Amino acid sequence: MTVGREKHAVCVFDREGGADDPSLLDKSALNEWLRSAGSASSLMATERSHFLLKDDEHTTEYVAPLRFAGRAKGALIVAFDRREDCSDTERRLIDAAAQQTALAAHICSLYQAARDTN
């Protein structure tokens, strides 16, 4: 997927953790969110019109930005069947996972840049 001139990887997992159909992600909505998010904080959506994942099985989405250099460059999106399952504790865990994911991606990009210069 491309946002502006930048390329991004997309990976969608089902409930059991297996790779699922990446077409479930509304890429244009994600691109728009990334363009407008800047350094935005996490978002909980309960209206289907605001969902980034296209399926009829969930009622709530929690979107945690993956920040690089202060800008949202990606997102960790978690869908919940029931709104009450998206508790404060769950949201804090998702935010922590997003921070770890962003850190891992940054380390990978530094490693790749170092390999490219050698």
Image (cartoon, rainbow, N blue to C red):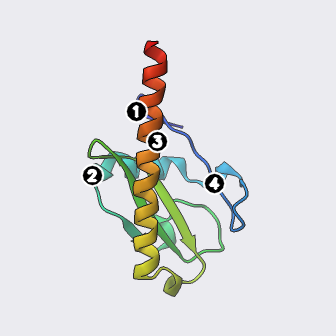
How many marks the image carries: the answer is 4
- Relative to 104, is 116 above or below? above
Q: Residue 38: x, y in percent?
A: 28, 49
Which mark's residue is nearer the viewer, 4 or 1? 4
Q: What residue sits right under mark 4 in the picture? A: 12
Q: What residue sits right under mark 2 in the picture? A: 39
Is label 4 in a helix, a strand or a loop?
loop
Q: What residue sits right under mark 1 in the picture? A: 4
Mark 3 in CB contact with mark 1 (< 8 angstroms): no
Give the CA separation, mark 2 to mark 3. Answer: 17 Å
Q: Residue 10: x, y in percent?
A: 58, 45
| Nearest to N terminus: mark 4 or mark 1 | 1
Q: Amino acid at mark 1?
A: Gly
Q: What residue sits right under mark 3 in the picture? A: 105
Residue 45 appears in view: no
Is label 2 in a helix, a strand or a loop?
loop
Give the CA separation, mark 3 to mark 1. Answer: 19 Å
Give the CA separation, mark 4 to mark 2. Answer: 23 Å
Is label 3 in a helix, a strand or a loop?
helix
The residue sitting at 58% across, 54% down in the picture is: 25
The answer to whether 33 appears left or right of 70 in the picture is: right
